[in-house]
Structures are given as structure tokens and as C-alpha cells.
Image (cartoon, rainbow, N blue to C red):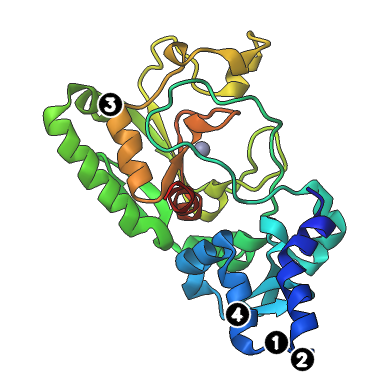
Amino acid sequence: MNPISSGKIILSPLIVLSFLTPAFPPLEQATSKWEDIPEVTVLLEVYGDFIQETATKDNDVAFLINKSWVYFRNGRMLTEESFRFQDRYQSIFYDYPLGKLIKPPKYQQMPVRSSDFLDLVFGTKETLLREQCDWVPFLDHKAYMNHFCEEALRKVETEIFYAAKSNVEVEDFVENLKIIYSFQQKKVRGSENASHHSYGLALDLVPESYDGKHANWKWSTAFIKEWHLIPLEKRWSPPQAVIDAFEKNGFIWGGKWSHFDAIHFEYAPEILRLTRLKNN
Ligand SMILES: [Zn+2]
């Protein structure tokens, strides 16, 4: 969908209203316009503490964050400077299947998502980002994580330790966890997207062994051309109880992406909340 036509879709109630009411609709109507967009509702719920103001600007919903406006643009979340490249970007929202994966994710091109929103929320300078992070104990290791997801990660750990008491698979997973990679100033492999690792919002749980299975699409491309067709039983995966514990607390699992990254978890509660909202 191109941004111009999507803009019309969002605008249409307002156009209709303009025939029925004076040029300036009452504030309640203007407000309900953006509150009717589920993605906007979810963004305000999750990132409300970082958003100083929400307004209708240039026929779009705009959020004021640290003195700059970021525009909804049908989920693309762009600053004015990015408007000229807007066709390159996809929405920051995407379909994420909850629960156990039953088949390999459908192939899709590596999405390009703007980092404008998270850049405004957390900043881009490494020193500033480090100030927002702390070492958080996690499964007998430590992860350098943003305060924004610290509490959620502690809850994940509690649930995994609890599950390990009665689930041998989970117990083995914890025992065989070799190293955790967390905060890194890096781009997502094979794309220009800034990774959630850049903000201290992602962690890679590297096991002692992958048992000869596939863990990352990029590693598999070297010897399997149709890597996206690799069946689930040949893909490495953390135990389902571990994935569930993360998802319950706002983290998504990279194993569910088309470009699968099975050791990767990232804090993106907006994706999970939107999925749950749509499922209800
Ligand atoms: Zn990662």
C-alpha cells in the first residue's frame, strides 16, 4: 500500500466529517481518530512515558519525543527528514505468530524498517545508550540491558527457573547456555536496519551446541540455497517453555522470523500487544 493512499484511508472519516460539521471538528473527534488506530493505541501504551505529546499533524498522527516529531505514516514511524525515503520503509509492526511454531515462516524479503522512533526514544550515542543500561543477571550469566526491559527480563528468568524444576529440556537449556550477547552497536546482519541490540533491548542466548541444527539463516545460506525451506526439526530452537516465558513478558523470538535467528530475543511488547489485540 502506498503512503498516499493509506493517508486517504486514515483521513476519510475526517473528510466525511468536514461536510457535516464546521471546518474544525470538536477535539473529541480528532482525538478518537488516532485512538481508533490499534497500532497507535499500542505505541501509546508501551512508550507513553517517552512521548511528550500526541497530535494530528500534516494529516497524520505525530508523536513528540525528545523535542522531535515522529510521524506514524501507516506504521513506518518516520521523522520529517526520512519522508523522502518513505517508500523504502515498511511498518515497524508485522505479523508475529503466538505460541508454538508449527511450520517454517513463509519466505519474505528482509524488511527495511526505520530506526527513527527508537533513535528518538533511546538516542543514538553510545555513551547515552550505556547510561540507560545495566548488567542484569540472567540464567547464571549476565546481560547488559536497557532499564526499559530490565524488569521484564527478570520476570522471564523467574519463569524459566521455575519451569526448569519440572522440565528437563529447560533444565538442560539453562545448563548448556554458553554465553549471552546483549548490547552491541551493530546493524542487523544483511540489512541496514539498526538492531535492537543497539539499544540494549536484545539478547542472544548462545548454547554450548546446536546439535548439528540450523540456528541462523545467514549461516545456512552458505550451504543451503533454499534455507527458508529448512524444516523445523532441522532448526535449532530453545525449549517452547523458554520462548513462552519471553513472549509472555514482551520479548519476541527471532526463530519466528522468515530470516530466522534462533538465539535472538528482543523486547518489542508493541508487536505482541498488537497481535493479542487483533486475536481478541
Ligand atoms: Zn541477536
Task: Identify the mark nearer the N-term, 4 or 2.
Answer: 2
* SS at badge 2: loop
Of 111 and 7, which appears nearest the observer? 7
* SS at badge 4: helix
Above or below, 55 relative to 201: below
- Crowd class of label 3 (few under 14; some 14 to 19; many from 20; radius 10 Å): many
Give the residue at x 63% y 73%.
Answer: 33
Amino acid found under the numbered disc labelled 2: Pro
Amino acid found under the numbered disc labelled 4: Thr
Residue under label 2: 22
Of labels 3 and 1, the one closer to you = 1
Residue under label 1: 25
Residue 211 x/y as whole percent: 38, 11
Q: CA distance from mark 4 to mark 3?
A: 48 Å
Of 253 and 220, which appears nearest the observer? 253
Q: Please indicate whether residue 29 sits to the left or right of residue 254 in the image.
A: right
Residue under label 3: 173
Q: Quadrant of residue 53?
A: bottom right
Amino acid found under the numbered disc labelled 1: Pro
Residue under label 4: 31
Task: Identify the mark nearer the N-term, 3 or 1.
Answer: 1
Q: Please indicate whether residue 206 sits to the left or right of residue 116 in the image.
A: left
Q: Is mark 3 within 8 Å of ligand 1?
A: no
Q: Are marks 1 and 2 in contact (CB under 8 Å)?
A: yes
Above or below, 26 relative to 160: below
Give the residue at x 21% y 46%.
Answer: 158
Q: CA distance from mark 2 to mark 3?
A: 63 Å
